[in-house]
Amino acid sequence: MNSTSCFRNLCAGFFLMALISGCSEEVSRPLLQVGEKAVPFTLELTGGQQSQLEHYAGKGLVITFMSSWCPCSNESLPLMKQAHATHKDAPVAFLMVGIQDSRSNFENFVKKWNVPFPAGYDKNDHIAKDYGVSSPPTTFFIDKNGIVKRAFYGNIAKKPDEFQQWVKEIIE
């Protein structure tokens, strides 16, 4: 094997690893840390309205960054929907932010799953970058004072009991 073939194989391997790790369970440190104030944002929702962090003042907020192509996002969404239904009368809101995706694919993802809470497409991943999110799914639990209480990176469906507890923590 010549050096050109080795280089091509190495590049193909790195590309494949980058593609796979886009929806990994690897823990990465976000810029936004537990105990910090959530970063203000304006997100255009799929219905055309706008959502801003200040709209959620006085209640807990679960923000999840997802992508249509990510298997972990697809596996996590049923648990998010269940939690939303369970806590519909509680002072907590759920918000899905589409990242690393095309607008049309994300909007189709929202329709396919019949997402019952606000969802919007993060054009150029600006909000994700402000929050330090490098891959989907990433979920932040923000209390009524706008403080990040928890952050989870990966498939939240693998931690259903913890997820429910984390939602309860930001309601109290």
Image (cartoon, rainbow, N blue to C red):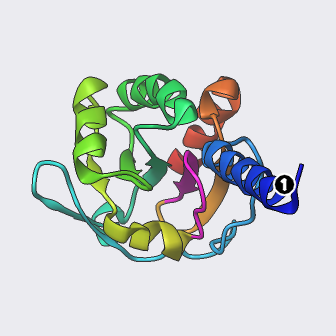
Report the residue at 24% width, 35% height from top.
108
Q: Which residue is pictured at 43% across the width and 22% down the height?
A: 82
Q: Amino acid at mark 1?
A: Cys
Badge 1: residue crowd in 10 Å (few <14, some 14–19, many ≥20):
few
Residue 133 position within the rendered picture, expressed as x and y whole percent measured from the top left:
58, 63
Tell which residue pokes out farthest to the left in this image: 48
Task: Tell me the quarter of the picture where residue 59 sits.
Answer: bottom left
Residue 155 versus residue 53: which sits nearer the camera? 155
Circle count: 1
Q: Is residue 130 left or right of residue 107?
A: right
Task: Indicate the quadrant where residue 29 lies.
Answer: bottom right
- Along the line of sight, the residue nearer the viewer: 12 or 82: 12
Q: Is residue 83 left or right of residue 119?
A: right
Query: Can the viewer see residue 38?
Result: no
| Residue situated furthest front in the rendering | 2
Viewer-closest of 30 and 151:
30
Q: Is 39 located above or below residue 63 in the figure? A: below
- Does the segment drawn in magenta span residue 28? no
139 magenta-colored: yes
Q: Is residue 45 above or below residue 107?
A: below
In the rendered image, residue 57, in percent from the top left (x then y), is placed at 36, 66
Q: Position of residue 159 (x, y in %)?
A: 69, 29
Which residue is depicted at the point 77% across and 49% down?
9
Q: Left or right of 102: which side holds 71?
A: right
Residue at x 56%, y 54% (from the top left corner): 140
Q: Is residue 128 visible?
A: yes
Q: Which residues are magenta?
A: 132-143
Instruction: Judge left or right: residue 65 versus residue 18.
Output: left
Disc 1 is placed on an element classified as helix
* Residue 53 position by quadrant: bottom left
Counting from the top left corner in percent of width and height, residue 96 is at: 38, 47
Mark 1 sits on what residue? 6
